Amino acid sequence: MLCISVLTIGTLGFTWIEQWGIWDSFFFTLYTLTTVGYDDHQMSITGQRFAAFLMIGGIGSVSYALSQIVQYAASKAVDTEKKMITKANRLSNHCIVCGLGRTGFHIISRLDEQAVPVVAIDSDEALVKIARDRGIITILGDATHDKAFHDAGISRAIAVAAATSSDSTNAMICLTARAIAPGIAISARAEEEDSINKLSRAGADAVISPTRYGGEGIADSMLRPSVAEVLYGSHFECDKKLHFREIPITNENNRAGLTISDLIENFPSIAYIASRKQSGDYDMRPGTSRVLENGDHLLIAGQSQDLAEIERYIPEQQKTAA
């Protein structure tokens, strides 16, 4: 509005003082405000004085208007960031994914399939915009700094993924996350084979090499195509692929005290692969008489709809006792 007012005043002023037409007056006002320069217009002394006044006042007004536009754009960016932080602060038991490359987006997609809330962190504004356009809560920041993790709500999160394409950056992310939240689960991406042990020493509980896993998947598809098809689902619909789950066994979820036989009776299509005790020891292919104890984790495989049912399962006798 300020620029329009200055243009109007300038146009009317030159029309009145110099007796020019509206267009000539308007065009000459633009000359003045944009500092392009004058042509051979002949002006009176009064017109020159008015032009000098217009130059001083007009340029100041245009500069002010531009500064307001920049300030508005900056405030919008700050408001967007505050909204993301507010949304992240409302979450709990969520996962934090650091790095929005192809790997990061695949991780988020997989977590979204499991209805796990996610907060992403990246310093690339273009990738952050893409993520936000997809509805992902995303913090614009450096995941090697404490602030980004605090903004993402690491104190209430259950896991962190260091998924950038740089092993050194992933190591710093692991160190930062472990220092802030010593008990949180951390998974890291390793581009180089010799980085796997380094990332583990930096605090990663699990280190995944996309190159190694990709190579193994291709080799499996060449040597054992049927196995690869079931595991990776190259020709299967999503709900027909073989999926794996880790089921926590606790007193709170009423699963402690169950036997594998109890689960087989209710979910015969599930494959019971292993159970992990609190000590970290694994019992591969646990027998039907194996009693699940508080703190165990049961590793199972099956189709997505069957796995969803067992994840929601609460034994009837435990319900009654409660």
Image (cartoon, rainbow, N blue to C red):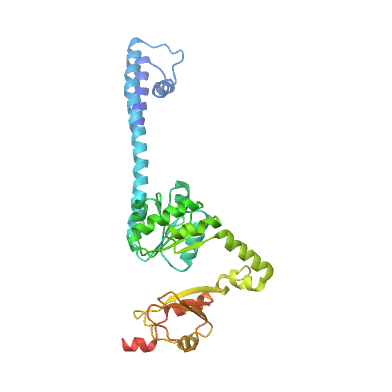
Location of the C terminus (image quadrant) = bottom left
Q: Is residue 15 above or below residue 161?
A: above
- Residue 50: x and y in percent read 33, 17
Residue 65 visible in rendering: yes
The residue positioned farthest toward the right in the image shown:
222
Location of the N terminus (image quadrant) = top left
Q: Residue at x 44, y 13 (%)?
A: 41
Residue 300 left/right relative to 236: left
Q: Is residue 122 above or below residue 279?
A: above
- Residue 202: x and y in percent read 43, 57
Residue 209 sits in which quadrant? Answer: bottom right
- Residue 15: x and y in percent read 37, 19
Residue 137 visible in rendering: no
Q: Residue at x 47, y 58 (%)?
A: 199
Residue 234 left/right relative to 205: right
Taking depth in this image into account, of 90 and 58 the one nearest to the observer is 90
Residue 320 sits in which quadrant? Answer: bottom left
